[in-house]
Image (tube, helix red, strand yellow):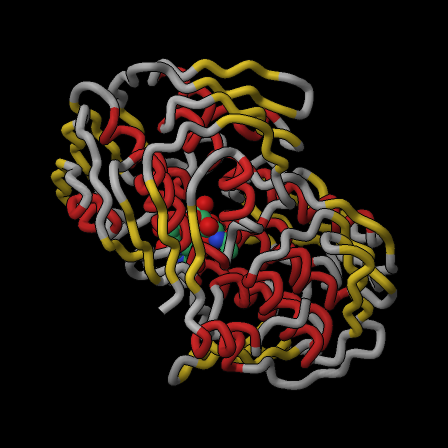
Amino acid sequence: MDQYIIRGGATLHGEVEISGAKNAAVAIIPAALLVKGVCRIENIPQISDTDTLLTILTQLGARVSYLSKSTIEIDCTDTRYQDAPYDLMRKIRASYYLIGSMLGRFGSAKTTMPGGCNFGVRPIDQHIKGMRALGAEISVKNGFVYADAIDGRLHGARVYLDKVSVGATMNIMIAAVLAEGRTIIENAAREPHIVDLANFLNSMGADVRGAGTDTIKINGVEELHGGTYTIIPDQIEAGTYMVAAAATGGEVLIKNIIPKHMEGISAKLRETGTVIEEFEEALLVKGPTSLRRINLKTMPYPGFPTDMQPQFGVLLCLANGTSVITEGIYDNRFKYVNELRKMGAEIQVDGRVAVIDGGRRLTGAPVHACDLRAGAAMVIAGMVASGVTEIDDIHFIERGYERFVEKLNALGADIQVHYDEEESASARAFSIS
Ligand code: UD1
């Protein structure tokens, strides 16, 4: 099995460049299907989730070419309807955006239910509610989603989301761009990648207003044209390096970020005693000699992001005193706690609340990456633990962090990657980059 082997005890120092935002890229790539023309997209993160989506588009007939490691061109001008490739769709969560983009472009979509990290039940009822409001007939049978625009084309409508959902907000936005008339999404999510998707669509000729607020208005247009767009930096990748710097007591300059997007994360880190200096497109993070306990609760943006919860879970094992983390988004996002316990952590979990008895010295152990962010948290734990930590299931981590090991080792970490030939070959079979 592919593994990271981490020798603990490093103090991170230096500079790290943040890549393009995963959760923006995984919506923008499927949205390119709406465009007749060449979309040049810059700052694409090289991660397995974007590879998978680009492979799906290629199989649907798109022409995809790399101009550099992080700049691609996607041309979907001649793409014709066909069923989405099920084996690839099942691999990732963001494949749900193909429902919106195929419906918008072709008036039909047949896909599988999306895969992705398992945090408990992750329904897509709000996506379906939105598509139905736009005039699609949708049924879910045996793990497949069948969607058809009743009149062959979607029609604008008012959609109120019963839950603030990032995925549903973006998917309805994608579907509505080529619909006839005006769509209004109320109780919309406000994450930075929602604004990024709207900016991408608008730069290709769409008319989307209000992204970043809880009401988004989309005036349908007849056609989108090609153009060039640069994806925003990844808020969660940046936050992960900030926590790594704080946990190891290091000093790291986090470059190519938008400090405004980091405010929730920076505020909680400052409460732990971490010093953060802000620059125009960078943050300097200095870990304290001793960390203070805090309480935190995950919430939709601009609240504290659930995707940073496991990394903070590790940090708070090191802080003096008892910390409480409340998970406000998902039912089952504390699976990583069992792995941390193997390293000496003292954490009690009751439903969506974890009570962390801090001030512990972690010791290296063989552990699993339970999911993408939990895997990143285990890497941080391995760097601060004494001895050697072996992490398996690292394919989860590689879904979302570009050159993670290379970047951490450049900051002074000691991480080796052991690739299992068979496992790597099957992973490479899906990669087109
Ligand atoms: C996206 C992100 C994920 C992040 C999450 C919250 C992607 C590919 N993934 O996931 O990294 O953790 O936002 O910031 O961008 N819900 C419903 N019905 C729905 C949709 C969601 O009940 O139709 C619930 C979910 O179970 C969850 C909450 O709403 O409890 C928020 O989910 P949502 O914001 O949709 O997350 P995802 O889009 O799946």
Does residue 156 lie above or below 13 as drawn? below
Does residue 194 lie above or below 321 as drawn? below
**Residue located 34% across and 43% down the image:** 7
**Residue located 20% across and 39% down the image:** 363
Relative image position of residue 332 (x, y in whole percent):
25, 52
Relative image position of residue 10 (x, y in whole percent):
39, 32
Foreground residue among 2 and 336: 2
Does residue 26 lie above or below 258 as drawn? below
Which quarter of the rendering shows the C terminus? Answer: bottom right
**Residue located 53% across and 44% down the image:** 188
Q: In the drawing, does residue 145 fall left or right of residue 380?
A: right
Q: In the drawing, does residue 155 fall left or right of residue 400?
A: right
Q: In the drawing, does residue 10 fall left or right of residue 199?
A: left
Foreground residue among 248 and 179: 248
**Residue located 59% across and 29% down the image:** 15
Residue 309 seen from this side: no
Does residue 48 lie above or below 292 as drawn? below
Residue 16 seen from this side: yes
Relative image position of residue 415 (x, y in whole percent):
42, 47
Count numbered badges in the picture: 0
Foreground residue among 425 and 315: 425
Q: In the drawing, does residue 433 fall left or right of residue 111?
A: right
Relative image position of residue 27 (x, y in whole percent):
62, 57
User: Where is residue 172, by image quadrant?
Assistant: bottom right
Which quarter of the rendering shows the N terminus? Answer: bottom left
User: Where is residue 121, by image quadrant?
Assistant: bottom left
